[in-house]
Image (cartoon, coloured by chain):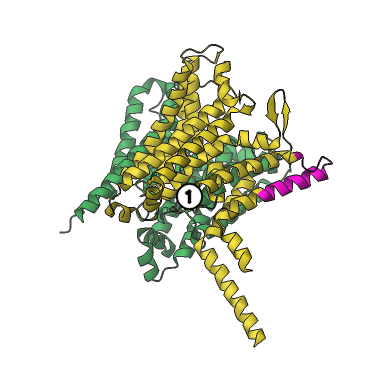
Amino acid sequence: MNKLKKITGKPLFLPIFCMLLVMAVNIVYDVSSGNFAFNFFTISVRNGVLYGRLIDILNRGSEVTILAIGMTLVVSASAGTDISVGSVMSLAASFCCMLLAGYGVSAANDLAVPLIVGVLGAILMGCICGAFNGFLVAYLNVQPMVATLILFSAARAIGLLLCNNLIVYVRNESFQFFGGYLGFLPTPIVIAAVCIAIVGILLKKTALGLYIQSVGINKRASRIAGLNSARIIFLCYLVCGLAAGIAGLVASSRISSADSNNIGLNYELDAILAVALGGNSLGGGKFNLAGSIIGAYTIQAISITLYALGVSTEQAPVYKAIIVILIVTIQAPPFKAWIKRMNAKRALEKGGAAA
Amino acid sequence: MKTRKINSNTMLLLITIALFFVMYIAGCAIYASKGFAHLQTFLNILINNAGLLCVACGMTCVMLTGGIDISVGALIAMDCMLLAVGMERWGMNSMVLCVLVLAVGVVFGLVQGFCVGYLEIQPFIVTMAGMFFARGMTAVICTDQVSISANEFFVKLANMKIEIPFGAYTNSKGVLQVPFIRITVVIALVVLIAVFLMLRFTKFGRSLYAVGGNEQSATMMGLDVKKTKLKAYVLSSFLCSIGGICFCLNTMSGSVRQALGLEMDAIASAVIGGTLLTGGVGNVIGSFFGVLINGTISTLVKTHGKLLSSWSNIAVAALLCFFIVLQSIFAKLKDNKK
């Protein structure tokens, strides 16, 4: 009993447990449909690139992972979530494709401007959106979700304006690289790994991680202790916007177009779910980046499993929404108190019986 | 003699009402040739936004407690889909379906309210999950776009014109045009008046303000804060379902993409109407003007003819942003005074 408590008390227990659960479901599914039992885990090399369901999850999960990094910081510092990430992704993608194809052009094979301009454009757009959210939250004290709600609905509309209401196609190999392959590895995996490494090192080598947590736990106390709380919160939103920009770039490169209505649709749910699944409290304070990242890949594994089971893209949010509610319920203090009471009651009954 | 002091909250409401009249009169002046000045244009704003008005009333109640409900747009999509599929595919009676939709709304609100009130989870997280759940459920019911045409009673109800005895005019072809409203406007106005009276005169209405003003002192006064919050979310989802029926009467169809971003319009209407995001201050009359401003913007964009429809989205978002900033400035000024 004590040992079990020790294991379940570990910070990474929840995400790893969920990951194992998803894998188990996959094995059962493979066996029941008559495939090789470990179909899920086989990785092979086809046409010179890695192939397999695990690689697929790592590849397709890159965007969510990149978003989850930014979201973790935002949740930790401001006790609120950034619900605009999906829309910002779409805006960054639209801006990038608009730059690359030229305004008003719906399909281009040649780039109108050097690739680097488009890439920097996407990232810059993400940063601007992040700064906008950050300014509202950090300096004007608007509730995070209301502040980000503005871009949640406006960013897609602005993206449509930039693209002149069209789906802009950029069929150019150099642009398709970001969603394609680097040697034998899919590029998105590499990009996600680089993002994780940079943020990981930054948090480990500097006191930034500690600052963010202390601002999240008590904003006023941190300010009295000498931290510029507002600037730290602003910075977190900026990083979140930046992450959304990069994710948007990857997503649009993957389909070599900017579809304002569909890029990043429902990604905000996935990113928030990744943070919650990673064992982080949505009430702010302490965070665990590794948990969020494992959480993000778990989400992707859940999505791919759902699709394999025949659930359509539009129906998948039902299951994810239920998972979110279950996780936040488990985390909720009144629920914990109730469990404690139940346990105490049971112990009392046991004691009574023994006597 | 006691003079009435204009505090910052009434100020916000006055700004809103002034803004509406300025916008509408400007619209009349610019688009006079396109018939903007006719009474019917104004009535059309009401007709098109009847559903939104119901939703905004519910949203105001939730925001008074300091919470928020972003599941409304998705819930409307689910209601419309349920109505459309129920009538077209399952051949159910429209009245039974309407009652079913309202029941679904109440259950939906109960779950959300329980999570917010009793489990103390952040309202945003709960209703966001609710939003994705409802949107997903819409796709589970049916993924096609279903339009309603078979149910005679429902079609008749949707096409019913309630003519207004004044303001008639002859159009360019010399045909007498009598201004009319639809049944949805009547429903929405009844909801508006009912909620207004409820907020002003019932115990529940006053406790909404008390809970939003200060939760701790509300508890100390002996109010059941948890129960009040639960009721607020149930009310919001219920009114949202009424709004869903109005919406369905307007569009006569159900699809997964329906009412996308309506939560934004509803929240914007309430905020523009002077409801504070922190709770405790607000009025449905303000929200009514918020809805009218919302409707005027989209009508202006439509009347212009050449602008993309996304402009109205952006304008509403910008307006919401403006009012949020105003609220925060007023809040800061108040803090400084203390």
Q: Main secondary structure of the magenta part?
A: helix
Q: Colour of chain B?
A: green
Q: Quadrant of residue B82?
A: top right
Foreground: B265 or A170? A170
Foreground: A126 or B292? A126
Using residue A312 as the reference point, say whether residue A295 is left or right of it: left
According to the image, label 1 marks what residue?
B124
Mark 1, other Cα within 10 Å: few <14 / some 14–19 / many ≥20: many
Which residues fall within the magenta stretch?
A: A20-39
Q: Is residue B100 visible in the rendered structure shown here? A: no
Residue extending farthest bottom: A355
Foreground: B78 or A246? A246
> Which quarter shows the N terminus of chain B?
bottom left
Q: Is residue A37 magenta?
A: yes
The picture places residue B122, in percent across and down from the top left corner, at 47, 54
The picture places residue B154, in percent across and down from the top left corner, at 63, 41
Residue occupying the point 52% across, 61% down: B119
Using residue A179 as the reference point, say whether residue B199 is left or right of it: left
